Amino acid sequence: MHNSIPVIAIDGPSASGKGTVAELVAAQLGFHYLDSGALYRIVALAAKQQNIDWDDALAIAKCAKTLDIQFKDGQVMLNGNDISDAIRTEEMGKGASRVAVHAPLRAALLDLQHSFCKAPGLVADGRDMGTVIFPNAPLKVFLTAATEVRAQRRYQQLLNKKQSGSNSQISYADILLDLQERDARDKGRASAPLIMAKDAILLETDHLSIAQAVDHVLQNYQSFTNLSA
Ligand code: DC
């Protein structure tokens, strides 16, 4: 890893908006972007395709090491197949959170995550970007919102998807329960749990638009670059 390359680490719970914010910040700065949650989703999908139990730590880590993962023009490719939509389901969100508890899998994904750190800089989003993967990141943001606000956002996203053709049944109560379960698993695991890094800035987005959250991160980054100039 190159310490001279600036990294903005954006961590937070599911449906906090961090993915959208991170992608927009990366686009504004012309930086690379790492969606680390996608990696855990890909592993959950690959394990399902190969009938590997999500609770089998060693088999999951072994499976991850065999995967050819590519991110190309907003598409996620696994072994040459476009799996961008297949990993975005609620099932794979839950599967990702299940496989992510395994320390051997987290170790297997370390080098791949570090390989995204290239000039001119990187915006990385996930649960442990600022605590474990890029602990020297000059700017760390912990982006969050109340569970009910996040559940409402996720519910709206799924309703929008339904309008554009998906026919799965959606209930706000199920989504809320699912988020609560996922938060508890991500925060409670022994390996790289979701916690705010000591030197992170807290950004609560309950009453912020995406554009306001992006501005906030960019302003903080600007202050950092002015200070270090
Ligand atoms: O950000 P996301 O919703 O796509 O992440 C899906 C799951 O992957 C999340 O519930 C926990 C896991 N994850 C993780 O453990 N560490 C990361 N850096 C990113 C995601």
Image: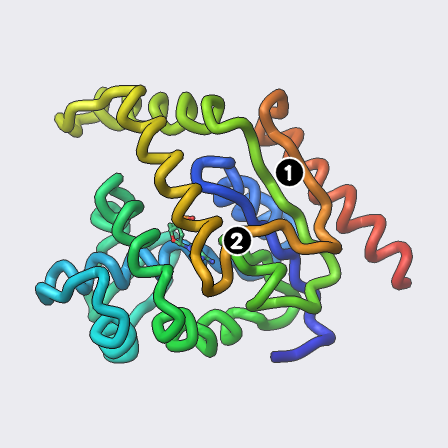
Q: Is residue 77 above or below residue 84?
A: below
Q: Is residue 3 left or right of residue 179?
A: right
Identify the residue position indicated by label 1 in the image: 214
Residue 96 vs residue 101, the one in the foreground:
101
Identify the residue position indicated by label 2 in the image: 125
Label 1 amino acid? Answer: Val
Q: How far apart are marks 2 and 1 (CA)?
A: 13 Å
Q: Is residue 108 above or below residue 18?
A: below
Label 2 amino acid? Answer: Asp
Q: In this view, does 104 lie above or below 217?
A: below
**Disc 1 residue lies near ligand 1 with CB under 8 A:** no
Residue plotted at (37% across, 35% down): 179
Question: Mark 2 or 1 closer to N-term?
Answer: 2
Q: Is residue 226 left or right of residue 12?
A: right
Residue plotted at (90% across, 57% down): 227
Local secondary structure at mark 1:
helix
Q: In this view, does 15 lie above or below 201?
A: above
Quarter placement of the N terminus = bottom right
Picture disc at residue 27: none
Dot 2 alpha-carbon crowd within 10 angstroms: few under 14, some 14 to 19, many 20 or more? many
Local secondary structure at mark 2:
strand
Quarter placement of the C terminus = bottom right
